[in-house]
Image: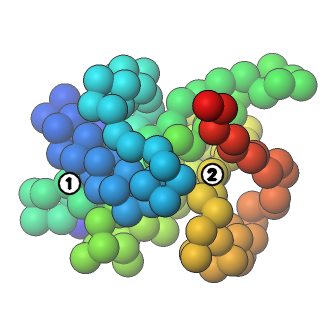
């Protein structure tokens, strides 16, 4: 298995993983994938996204962007997508640890991770806390008709 910063040759495969994520996790919220919007978002985060590769196939992606902290000038890596396909989930933590090491080397002081509220929420919370993350904010969504 190889983990590295994404490269142009990974773009299509990483986009497919994001589409898998949307199908698996977002549909229950009434959110459906708009390919054009996905491409716009992915173009913004692609240079600060990472891929996990097994047998020359991209099987995981952790994508985010580097921003300034709201209250300080410290850099923050804000995760927007973390998805590993079902057959390779065992590589998910290795992908996250790689990103943490990259952030450390880049002088990034904080990582924020998102968590969907669904049947896996409790397990994800426990995992994040075990890895040293603390809950900071809960976001709510409301569809306006």
Q: Which mark is residue 58?
A: 1
Q: In this view of the protein, can residue 95 be seen by the observer?
A: no
Q: Is residue 30 above or below residue 38?
A: below
* Depth check, front residue: 144 or 99: 144
Residue ranking furthest to the left: 56
Instruction: List x then y, in percent, for residue 54.
Output: 18, 65
Instruction: List x then y, in percent, for residue 40.
Output: 36, 21
User: Quadrant of the rendered structure where residue 55 is?
Assistant: bottom left
For mark 1, does the 10 Å Cα neighbourhood hold few (<14), some (14 to 19), or many (20 or more) residues? many
Residue ranking furthest to the right: 71
Q: Which mark is residue 114?
A: 2
Q: Is residue 137 left or right of residue 112?
A: right
Who's the residue at 22% across and 47% down the image?
A: 16
- Please, what secondary structure does the residue beneath circle 1 have? strand
Who's the residue at 51% across and 37% down the image?
A: 64
- Please, what secondary structure does the residue beneath circle 2 have? loop
C-alpha distance separating marks 2 and 1: 22 Å
Q: Which mark is residue 117?
A: none
Q: Earlier in the sequence, mark 2 or mark 1?
A: 1
* Depth check, front residue: 59 or 22: 22
Q: Is residue 144 left or right of residue 120?
A: right
Who's the residue at 81% across and 58% down the image?
A: 135
Q: In this view of the protein, can residue 72 be seen by the observer?
A: yes
Instruction: List x then y, in percent, for residue 80.
Output: 53, 41
| Number of on-image labels | 2
Q: Quadrant of the C terminus?
A: top right
* Depth check, front residue: 19 or 84: 19
Q: Is residue 132 above or below residue 47?
A: below
């Amino acid at each position: 298995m190889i983990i590295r910063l994404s490269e142009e040759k990974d773009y299509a495969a990483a986009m497919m993983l994001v589409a898998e994520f949307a199908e698996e996790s977002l549909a229950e919220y009434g959110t459906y994938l708009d390919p054009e919007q996905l491409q716009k978002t992915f173009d913004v985060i692609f240079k600060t996204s990472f891929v996990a590769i097994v047998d020359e196939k991209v099987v995981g992606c952790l994508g985010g962007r580097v921003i300034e902290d709201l209250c300080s000038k410290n850099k923050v890596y804000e995760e927007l997508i973390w998805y590993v396909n079902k057959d390779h989930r065992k590589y998910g933590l290795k992908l996250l640890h790689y990103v943490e090491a990259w952030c450390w080397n880049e002088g990034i002081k904080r990582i924020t991770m998102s968590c969907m509220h669904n049947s896996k929420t409790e397990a994800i919370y426990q995992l994040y806390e075990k890895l040293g993350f603390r809950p900071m904010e809960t976001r709510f969504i409301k569809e306006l008709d």
